[in-house]
Image (spheres, grey):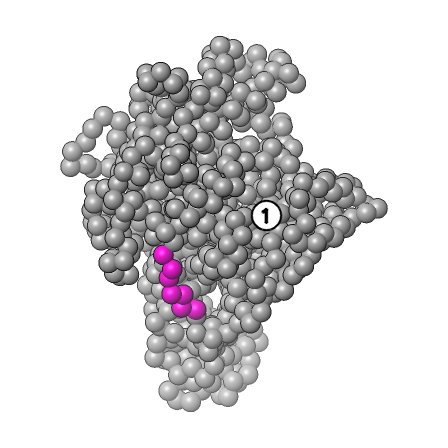
């Protein structure tokens, strides 16, 4: 991969802290990135890190996972089977804004005389805090303290504690708490030069339905013009002060505000707690959502802000117990901070995911329109399976809920079985560029790969039988129908006209990754159905009847898997990415200016397709996911060939290459690649963190530590480790949940310690050696390098 210069955040502005990301100075040059970095969310509801005052702002952000508008995809030249309906996650009603005036002077960050400033994303507490000392033009010193929270325990609830104290004199204060629904018409051609960004609408999306105010409580309800989705947002306020104050309320169709007026005494704080509640639906009437919102507001205001933060702390304590990676490196504390930052943002993208997927940028920005990709199954599911298996189960159940639409999509492409969409919110394909979208049929195998890992690591066979088996039937049917047997006398099963993970190579024959993963999909379908038939014959018969499945079809899948063609070049000793890849000219990396990366923004796709140049891991990804299918020599030759051809234009490559580099003993290269992944957002490696956090890369960072440095392999549910002595690292420690037991792995310079922290017994492997941990013997120490 091409090496990139990593520019870490300046320490005088962003000092080092293992558990917090701290900003010590208001820095407008980093405003766009900070809106992403300081975002808080719970997987259902997310706020970008916009300041409470509402301005200055680069991109306002209040998002609800899966809450979208849809629109007809317009093609200059359409064709049969093209995706028809686009879906875009919406920026919804903004309830964060709180405006402050002192003696009629507005508090405005760019011009304010700030005597002190600190903003903290507290990853241990799950809060965003800000502490400012402002001196007004008249010399009055004003302390402004806020704490923002999006509750993990209460899915629909957020809150802000906003406290103002005039320290050296009395003053007149005006505090305006606002609520605003987006109303502007946006240009649908905006940012069309960058396909990663969200398209905009040329019409008003939100149709007002309800607007009401009662005392200090406000409700706004809207329906989305085309998708028909409904939304209610409500806010209520609690005032804590010894100052005398008054307030007035204003409410309109798309906005509302509660304005507090008071004569603040010197040193006497005015604290406003703003409770914010969101409820959304695909079909419930707005009036019903408003009723739900009122009930939630009643509950949260009765419990109070302190109970909300205490519940958040309980949730965070449990999360870190099950998920933390503790790393001690020589002369490097930033990596520890980055690792926790990444895990924290994965939590924020996934914690309360129920009935939806996880967007490529979580709930931190509009890039990729809030769509769900293969990112979830390949990059996030390993972390979730080993740390939050209930969340992993929710995500797989969501994929199952889309199965009927996947069946319909397969028929639209003249195929049997089911084809899951490459990018979607609703389950309908939303990718307008079929060459790098629909043609990535490997999405089917990716989902089934995640299903297999979930079942084998958790032992949840009930889920396999109730949900997974049906998905396996339909995806296996798809592969059997898509492929064909060659007529060259070799009786091999080929798959043509596909695109693999590398989007710089499109519509190819026998993409190695696709064929290898399709084979795995077919094999697992056969194995699972045989297991279901053996353990629950009545269930098997019912499923076979419902899906019109015959035993001869299962044999067809077994045969296709056994005869799957996997490209291999005997002379080079490598697996060609596809049938034609090695015949292409190698991209001229030496004479490509750094500013021309990513290539997709500077070269026509047809130019890129003509060369050996890789956007993201393809063959190398296959070697990681199904490493037991490759010899060590094959892995080495493949890695050595493909690493120099990979641009790093995708944030999803460095973590995967790092894992293989560890396995092959390229330890310095592995550590370099880990840092690219770990620092992706805090160092803005890709230059686009302003558009949202790279959630999949964050999951890849966890994989690089656990599968890379620790050498975890879990093929067939067998948990084994082959840890490496990490360069420039004193120790690494992390937990894993395996079939309900909590295992802790501690790697030091010359040894590794395995400890059973919870559970009666667990069998793992250190290399080829079996280790049995129990309550009586919970720990085992092994020397590094002794894994034979």
Q: Name the secondary structure under disc 1.
A: loop
- Would you identify the image quadrant in which residue 498 lies? top left
248 or 405: nearer the eye?
A: 405
547 or 744: nearer the eye?
A: 744
Question: In the orientation shown, which residue stands out farthest toward the right?
Answer: 776
752 is higher (above) or lower (below) than 759: below
Question: In the orientation shown, which residue stands out farthest toward the left?
Answer: 76
**Numbered circles on residues, count:** 1
502 is higher (above) or lower (below) than 316: above
Which percent across, then down, holds residue 3? 38, 60
590 or 215: nearer the eye?
A: 590
Residue located at (26% from left, 30% from top): 82
Q: Give the class, few, some or many, for how many residues have Cα within 10 Å of label 1's Cα (few <14, many ≥20).
A: many
Q: What residue does disc 1 label?
A: 711
Is residue 203 visible in the rendered structure shown here?
no
Is residue 3 located in the magenta-colored stretch of the structure? yes
605 or 227: nearer the eye?
A: 605
749 is higher (above) or lower (below) than 770: below
Residue located at (47% from left, 72% from top): 14
Residue located at (21% from left, 42% from top): 606
Which percent across, then down, holds residue 752? 69, 54
Is residue 198 located in the magenta-colored stretch of the structure? no
Question: In the orientation shown, which residue stands out farthest toward the front?
Answer: 571
Which image quadrant: the C terminus?
A: top right
Which percent across, then down, holds residue 404? 42, 24
Position of 706 with respect to 405 (left or right) is right
- Over which residues does the magenta segment extend? 2-8
Instruction: Name the main secondary structure of what is drawn in magenta.
Output: loop
């Amino acid at each position: 991969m091409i090496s990139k210069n990593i520019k870490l955040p300046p320490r005088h502005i962003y000092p080092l802290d293992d558990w917090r990301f701290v900003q010590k100075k208001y820095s407008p040059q980093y405003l766009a990135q900070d809106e992403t970095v300081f975002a808080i969310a719970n997987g259902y509801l997310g706020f970008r890190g916009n300041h409470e005052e509402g301005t200055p702002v680069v991109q306002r952000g209040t998002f609800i996972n899966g809450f979208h508008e849809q629109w007809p995809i317009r093609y200059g030249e359409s064709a049969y089977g093209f995706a028809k309906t686009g879906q875009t996650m919406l920026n919804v009603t903004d309830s964060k804004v709180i405006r402050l005036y002192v003696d009629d002077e507005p508090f405005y960050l760019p011009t304010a005389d700030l005597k002190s400033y600190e903003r903290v994303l507290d990853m241990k507490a799950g809060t965003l805090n800000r502490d400012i000392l402002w001196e007004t033009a008249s010399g009055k010193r004003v302390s402004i303290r806020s704490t923002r929270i999006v509750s993990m325990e209460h899915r629909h609830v957020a809150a802000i504690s906003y406290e103002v104290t005039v320290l050296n004199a009395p003053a007149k204060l005006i505090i305006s708490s606002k609520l605003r629904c987006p109303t502007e018409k946006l240009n649908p051609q905006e940012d069309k030069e960058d396909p990663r960004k969200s398209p905009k609408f040329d019409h008003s999306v939100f149709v007002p339905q309800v607007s009401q105010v009662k005392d200090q409580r406000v409700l706004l309800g809207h329906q989305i013009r085309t998708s028909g989705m409904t939304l209610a947002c409500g806010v209520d306020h609690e005032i804590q002060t010894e100052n005398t104050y008054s307030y007035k309320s204003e409410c309109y169709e798309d906005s509302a505000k509660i304005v507090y007026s008071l004569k603040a005494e010197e040193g006497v704080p005015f604290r406003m707690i703003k409770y914010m509640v969101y409820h959304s639906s695909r079909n419930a009437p707005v009036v019903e959502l408003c009723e739900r919102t009122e009930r939630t507001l009643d509950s949260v205001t009765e419990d109070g802000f302190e109970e909300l933060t205490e519940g958040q702390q309980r949730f965070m304590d449990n999360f870190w117990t099950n998920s933390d990676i503790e790393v001690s490196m020589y002369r490097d504390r930033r990596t520890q901070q980055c690792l926790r930052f990444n895990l924290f943002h994965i939590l924020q993208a996934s914690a309360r995911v129920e009935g939806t997927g996880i967007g490529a940028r979580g709930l931190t920005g509009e890039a990729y329109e809030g769509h769900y990709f293969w990112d979830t199954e390949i990059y996030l599911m390993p972390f979730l399976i080993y740390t939050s298996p209930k969340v992993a189960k929710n995500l797989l159940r969501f994929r199952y809920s889309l199965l009927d639409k996947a069946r319909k999509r397969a028929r639209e492409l003249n195929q049997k079985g089911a084809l899951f969409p490459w990018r979607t919110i609703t389950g309908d394909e939303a990718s307008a560029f079929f060459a790098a979208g629909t043609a990535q049929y490997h999405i089917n195998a990716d989902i089934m790969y995640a299903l297999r890992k979930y079942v084998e690591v958790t032992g949840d066979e009930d889920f396999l039988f109730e949900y997974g088996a049906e998905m396996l039937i339909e995806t296996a049917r798809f592969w059997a129908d898509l492929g064909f047997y060659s007529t060259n006398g070799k009786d091999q099963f080929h798959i043509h006209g596909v695109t693999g993970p590398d989007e710089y190579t499109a519509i190819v024959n026998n993409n190695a990754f696709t064929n290898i993963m399709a084979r795995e999909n077919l094999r697992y379908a056969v194995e699972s159905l045989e297991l279901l038939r053996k353990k629950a014959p009545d269930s098997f018969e019912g499923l076979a009847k419902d899906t019109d499945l015959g035993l001869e079809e299962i044999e067809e899948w077994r045969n296709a898997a056994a005869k799957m063609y996997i490209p291999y070049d005997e002379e080079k000793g490598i697996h060609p990415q596809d049938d034609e890849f090695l015949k292409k000219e190698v991209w001229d990396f030496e004479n490509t200016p750094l500013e021309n990366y990513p290539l997709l923004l500077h070269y026509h796709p047809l130019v890129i397709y003509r060369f050996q140049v890789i956007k993201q891991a393809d063959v190398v990804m296959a070697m990681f996911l199904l490493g037991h299918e490759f010899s060590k020599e094959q892995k080495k030759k493949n890695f050595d060939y493909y690493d120099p051809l990979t641009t790093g234009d995708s944030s999803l490559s460095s973590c995967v290459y790092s894992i293989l580099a560890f396995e092959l003993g390229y330890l310095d290269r592995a550590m370099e690649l880990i840092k690219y992944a770990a620092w992706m957002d805090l160092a803005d490696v890709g230059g686009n963190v302003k558009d949202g956090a790279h959630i999949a890369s964050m999951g890849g960072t966890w994989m690089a530590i656990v599968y890379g440095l620790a050498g975890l392999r879990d093929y067939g549910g067998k948990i084994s480790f082959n840890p490496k002595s990490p360069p420039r690292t004193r120790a690494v420690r992390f937990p894993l949940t395996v079939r309900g037991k909590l295992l802790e792995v501690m790697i030091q310079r010359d040894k590794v310690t395995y400890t059973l922290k919870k559970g009666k017994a667990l069998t793992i492997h250190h290399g080829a050696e079996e280790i049995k941990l129990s309550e009586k013997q919970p720990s085992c120490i092994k020397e590094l390098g002794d894994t034979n």
